[in-house]
Amino acid sequence: MRRPLVAGNWKMHGSRAGVAELIMGLRELALPADVEVAVFPPYVYLAKVVEELGRVAVGVGAQDCAIEPQQGALTGEIAACQLQDVGCSMVLVGHSERRLLLGESDDWVVRKFAAAQACSLTPVLCVGETLEQREAGKTLEVVGRQLAGVVDALGVEVFARAVVAYEPVWAIGTGLTASPEQAQEVHAAIRAQLADKSAEVASGVRILYGGSVKAANAAELFGMPDIDGGLVGGASLNADEFGAICRAAGN
Ligand code: PGA
């Protein structure tokens, strides 16, 4: 069985004081043992969060990494191996805010995915359609293309050590959530696309849903057969709310 994963994407939020407070809240949570929990703070707080949360079995990941795995001359970037060095175990790649606002291409997403795995980090590949694409009936085509970018370049086997996050762009930070049925349809399509190449990889890979997940809608979403947890933005900034979402992914 796939172990559910709830991942908190803090995005560009936080201050030293705010992060300390959030860490304190997270340490006090009773987290379900059958759920893997991880948080993705901004780079500058990573080492601190690793240090403080290591003991409570909350994984720590970064929100992005450079296209080159090793350290080198690339001003402003952070290498996957540096993330691994400070204690990260995961990294988001291809978040829609990076694809759409920073012009990150499918090619770069592939390189970042490969860089992460080269440094023993688990990449969390984010895919998802815009509202325009959904309204044009192109959801499965767009998501399928984003997934195929990685599968074609690196092979399906890389998904034995990766996570996929389906995040409809129109649901991110908007308060609009995909219905459990809408999300399940896309999750099933992602799994089927992987199963075309390897049934074993497809049945083992965890596919998270992201987009305005909160305590009030988490259980319904996580109850769908192909939804294996969530990538949570805004609601992960409140420890109690995040804890409730983690518990909703349990049993
Ligand atoms: P949200 O963000 O939960 O605030 O919608 C999710 C994400 O972008 O990862």
Image (cartoon, helix red, strand yellow):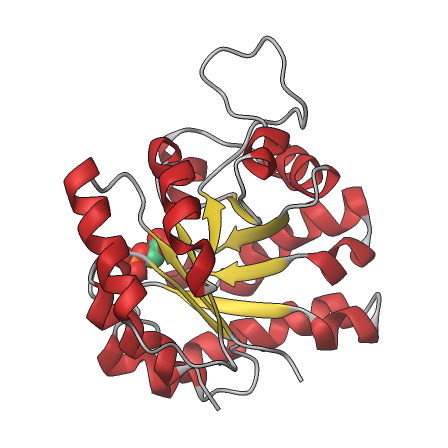
Where is residue 2 shown, x and y percent of the image?
63, 79
**Above or below, comparing residue 132 to residue 239 in the picture:** above
**Above or below, comparing residue 89 to residue 69 in the picture:** below
Please give left or right for residue 236 compared with residue 17 in the image.
right
Residue found at x 34% / y 37%: 45
Residue found at x 70% / y 45%: 120
Figure quadrant of residue 188: bottom right
**Above or below, comparing residue 159 to residue 221 in the picture:** above
* Residue sitting nearer the eye, 60 or 118: 60
* Residue sitting nearer the eye, 29 or 123: 29
Residue found at x 64% / y 46%: 121
Where is residue 123 shown, x and y percent of the image?
61, 49
* Residue sitting nearer the eye, 164 or 104: 164
**Above or below, comparing residue 171 to residue 70 in the picture:** below
Figure quadrant of residue 51: top left
Figure quadrant of residue 23: bottom left
Where is residue 134 shown, x and y percent of the image?
41, 62
Q: Is residue 212 visible?
A: no
Please give left or right for residue 30 compared with residue 58 in the image.
left
Q: Specify the quarter for ligand 1.
A: bottom left
Please give left or right for residue 251 compared with residue 41 in the image.
right
Q: Tell which residue pokes out farthest to the front in this image.
A: 55
Where is residue 167 shown, x and y percent of the image?
43, 60
**In which quadrant is the N terminus drawn?**
bottom right
Q: Is residue 165 visible?
A: yes
Residue found at x 45% / y 38%: 99
Question: How many numbered callouts?
Answer: 0
